[in-house]
Image (tube, rainbow, N blue to C red):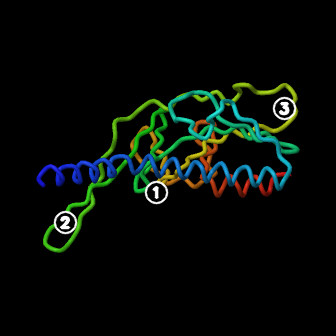
């Protein structure tokens, strides 16, 4: 009987640990369906750079997907945030870190304390990987698609001050986008 309790406890802990990655997989599968639907409805061409492009990792330097419209080419790199209640902070010096929060409940009130991850260098993404010659006449759009999305995006200057970024803002030569924003841009593309 005692071992059964440990097995249940083990599976509960395992689910807590892997839940963000299961969420990420489902969000990416929904992302595929929504992007393909817009491309099909608008008659856009979709080109992937590898077979499992929807599992694109933030640390790989190659773009994951191209969407060709009549006048533009969307070069898309996927950047996943497995936990929703975090903040993605991109620093001016080319690094990024993730801010998560720990809540402490005491005497009926709760306080949230931010915990910043170790700053990591933002990879210099190759948005021209497998770029086609016929696209040279079209306007390129360099998209960093954050999917699943975090609670907020911020930009930190070298002095340490932070500003909140909106989806569609340009940082380090890339448009930071959420999936709804990208779908809206694709719907309105000419």
Circles 3 and 2: CB distance less than 8 Å? no
> In the displayed structure, does residue 31 sit left or right of residue 151?
right
- Gap in Å between the C-alphas at discs 1 and 3? 34 Å
Mark nearer the N terminus (3 vs 2): 2
The tag earlier along the polypeptide, 1 or 3, is: 3
Name above or below for residue 188 compared with residue 128. below
Q: Residue at x 34, y 36 (%)?
A: 118
* Label located before the other in sequence (2 or 1): 2
Residue at 44 percent across and 46 percent down: it is: 21
Residue nearer the viewer, 9 or 174: 9
Under tag 1, what secondary structure? loop
- Residue 132 vertical position relative to residue 19 in the rendered view, above or below: above
Q: In the displayed image of the protein, which residue is found farthest to the bottom?
A: 108
Image-quadrant location for residue 131: top right
- Is 65 above or below relative to 181? above
Q: Are marks 1 and 3 in contact (CB under 8 Å)?
A: no
Q: What kind of element bears circle 2? A: strand
Disc number for residue 111: none
> Of residues 108 and 95, which is closer to you in this image?
108
The residue beneath circle 3 is: 135
Dividing the picture into quadrants, the one containing residue 77 is top right
Q: Tags 2 and 1 in contact by the CB under 8 Å rule? A: no
User: Residue 134: horizontal and vertical position, in percent?
Assistant: 87, 29
> Which residue is disc 2 drawn over?
105
As measured in the structure, the alpha-carbon distance from the residue carrying label 3 to the one carrying label 2 is 56 Å
10 Å neighbourhood of mark 1: few (<14), some, or many (≥20)? few
Q: Which residue, given by chain and number where applicable, does mark 1 sit on?
A: 151
Residue that appears at 62% across and 44% down: 170
Give the percent coordinates (x, y) of residue 155.
49, 46
Q: Marks 2 and 1, Cα distance to the nearest angstrom?
A: 22 Å
The quadrant of the picture occupied by the N terminus is bottom left
């Amino acid at each position: 009987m005692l071992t059964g309790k440990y097995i249940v406890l083990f599976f509960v802990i395992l689910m807590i640990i892997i839940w963000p990655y299961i969420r990420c997989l489902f969000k990416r599968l929904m992302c595929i369906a929504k992007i393909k639907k817009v491309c099909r409805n608008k008659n856009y061409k979709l080109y992937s750079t590898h077979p499992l492009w929807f599992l694109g990792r933030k640390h790989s330097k190659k773009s994951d997907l191209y969407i060709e419209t009549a006048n533009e080419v969307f070069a898309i790199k996927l950047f996943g945030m497995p936990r929703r209640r975090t903040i993605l902070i991109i620093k001016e010096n080319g690094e990024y870190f993730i801010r998560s929060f720990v809540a402490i409940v005491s005497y009926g009130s709760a306080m949230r304390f931010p915990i910043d991850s170790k700053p990591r260098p933002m990879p210099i993404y190759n948005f021209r990987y497998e770029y086609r010659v016929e696209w040279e006449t079209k306007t390129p759009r360099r998209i960093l698609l954050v999917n699943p999305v975090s609670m907020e995006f911020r930009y930190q200057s070298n002095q340490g001050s932070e500003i909140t970024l909106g989806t569609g803002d340009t940082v380090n030569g890339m448009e930071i986008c959420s999936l709804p924003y990208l779908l809206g841009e694709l719907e309105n593309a000419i």
